[in-house]
């Protein structure tokens, strides 16, 4: 008879900083899994240089959720009476970082950013406002 594995001890998250650190660890694990999946399932596309992030890509929703979240523009409200707030440096800094974490090569990132600009996504927040919106409108047709 084999002994049962001991349950992992989990540490309670006590401060907001610990919550942010845990979110970062979970996010890195998610991206590590995506990188592996990308390497295995889309290897042909990567070798041929055809991979580009667009609203039709099967991982678009993951990309958008990361770009909206703390790794990207960090959309938020401070309370119910304040308007929506977000961070944007008027470039594609966050999109570039996220695409890199998802396993994109510099050439693929460059093609993707060019596509975003053609669709009105001249910076990270405009990717969300214009490119993602256009993709959702096209899906509704």
Image (tube, helix red, strand yellow):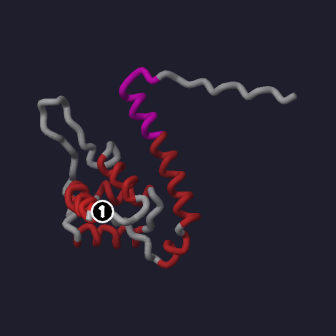
Mark 1, Cα crowd under 10 Å, few <14 / some 14-19 / many 20+, is few
Q: Residue furthest bottom?
A: 48
In the image: residue 36, left or right of residue 101: right
Looking at the picture, tell me which residue is in the foreground, 41 or 19: 41
Quadrant of the snapshot with the N terminus:
top right
Does the stretch in magenta take in 57?
no
Please say if 65 is above or below 21: below
Residue 79 x, y percent position in the rendering: 18, 29
Q: Please tell me in which quadrant of the rendered image residue 76 appears.
A: top left
Please say if 128 is above or below 41: above
Q: Please tell me in which quadrant of the rendered image residue 93 appears.
A: bottom left
Residue 115 x, y percent position in the rendering: 29, 71
Q: Residue at x 42, y 58 (%)?
A: 59
Quadrant of the snapshot with the C terminus:
bottom left
Residue at label 1? 139
Q: Residue at x 27, y 61 (%)?
A: 140
Q: Residue at x 53, y 68 (%)?
A: 42
Residue 70 x, y percent position in the rendering: 32, 42
Main SS category, magenta section? helix
Q: Which residues are magenta?
A: 13-25
In the image: residue 55, left or right of residue 91: right
Q: Please tell me in which quadrant of the rendered image residue 116 appears.
A: bottom left
Looking at the picture, tell me which residue is in the foreground, 76 or 141: 141
Kindly state the secondary structure of the residue where label 1 is placed: helix
């Amino acid at each position: 008879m084999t002994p049962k594995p001991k349950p992992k001890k989990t540490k309670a998250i006590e401060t907001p900083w610990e919550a942010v650190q845990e979110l970062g660890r979970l996010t890195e694990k998610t991206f590590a899994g995506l990188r592996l999946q990308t390497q295995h399932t889309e290897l042909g596309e990567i070798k041929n240089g055809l991979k580009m992030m667009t609203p039709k890509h099967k991982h678009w929703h993951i990309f958008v959720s990361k770009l909206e979240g703390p790794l990207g523009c960090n959309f938020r409200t401070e309370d119910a009476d304040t308007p929506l707030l977000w961070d944007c440096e008027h470039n594609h800094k966050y999109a570039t970082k996220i695409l890199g974490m998802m396993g994109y090569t510099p050439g693929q990132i460059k093609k993707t950013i060019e596509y975003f600009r053609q669709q009105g996504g001249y910076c990270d927040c405009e990717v969300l406002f214009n490119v993602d919106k256009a993709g959702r409108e096209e899906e509704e047709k």
